[in-house]
Image: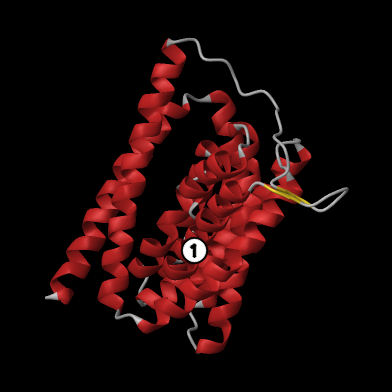
Amino acid sequence: MFALLAAVVAGAFIGLSLGALGGGGSILAVPVLLALGQSATQATTGSLVVVGVTSLAGAVTAHRAGNVLLARGVTFGAVAIGGAVLGAHASAAVPEPVLLAAFSALMLVVAGLMTARQLRSRRGRSAGAHADRPRLDEPIITFSPTFMCQCPRALKVLVTATTVGLLTGFLGVGGGFLVVPALVLALALPMGYAAGTSLVVITITSTAALATRAGTGIAPDWWLVAALTVTAVAGSIAGARVAARTDTARISTAFTGLVLLVAAYTAATAVPALT
């Protein structure tokens, strides 16, 4: 009973972070499940459910708001499926301490990226930066009326999408902090569209990774996962409302500090087991 209550509270916080900050909250799903007694493989598998369902709900909301380029998101996600499948297979083949150490390293990277984003955002506000305006670039590959391929960009999409898929499949996280810049760099999407479109990509890669793990016999406590997922979805809706009324810079700073603390705890648990 206590575990379910803890999952509800943690899920609400994860969703609140996702809704208010537009990403990052799902990375807490794995350490939350670990703290509730799940093994590393169970936690990363359960996290895929939390990440996938919450991203789907967010993608629907973003699409209604006109902030999703569906065709591009589906295309990028389809390319990323190969990496997600490989990552899911690899996660089952490595020792759990290695998986935890990799996850703690990832959280440190996330904290660094979030800190850098906060600094850029502050500089942008002080410089009076303008909001992104919708602008779409040329297609990378066309077949009509003649075949045309911007092959360097196509290669960039292949590499970045595969990397995103590997991350999702291996560590059970959505990787929104990586998907958004990947869409900006590889597909030249404006930031406003990249944030919404990334949710489509995360939904696809999480589903592919979860389907790959389905036949491995790895089964988390589905009641905990369900409680975490439902409250994360509800929290994301509340978080979006909070973001409209609150200075998200303060929320982001607090969240970055939390990620650092969780990363340190995870590393302290994993590193001794590696020696």
Q: In this view, does 262 lie to the left or right of 274?
A: right
Q: Residue most toward the front?
A: 146
The image quarter in which residue 124 lies: top left
User: Dot 1 corresponds to which residue?
Assistant: 168
Q: Residue most toward the right?
A: 145
Q: Can residue 270 be seen in this view?
A: yes
Quadrant where the C terminus sits is: bottom left
Q: Nearer the viewer, residue 26 or 195?
A: 195
Q: How many marks?
A: 1
**Residue 107, position as x, y percentages in the image:** 33, 53
Q: Which of 71 and 247 is in front in this view?
A: 71
Q: Which of 137 and 59 is in front in this view?
A: 137
Identify the residue at horizontal 29%, vertical 81% (top origin).
95
Identify the residue at horizontal 59%, vertical 47% (top origin).
153
Identify the residue at horizontal 50%, vertical 25% (top origin).
246
**Residue 9, position as x, y percentages in the image:** 46, 55
Q: Report helix, strand or loop for mark 1.
A: helix
Q: How crowded is mark 1: few (under 14 residues within 10 Å), some or many (20 or more)?
A: many
**Residue 220, position as x, y percentages in the image:** 48, 78
Q: Is residue 201 left or right of residue 22?
A: right
Q: Which colour scheme is used?
A: secondary structure
**Residue 106, position as x, y percentages in the image:** 33, 56
Quadrant where the N terminus sits is: bottom left
Residue 270 drawn above or below residue 129: below
Q: Can residue 13 be seen in this view?
A: no
- What's the amino acid at mark 1? Thr
Identify the residue at horizontal 46%, vertical 72% (top origin).
87
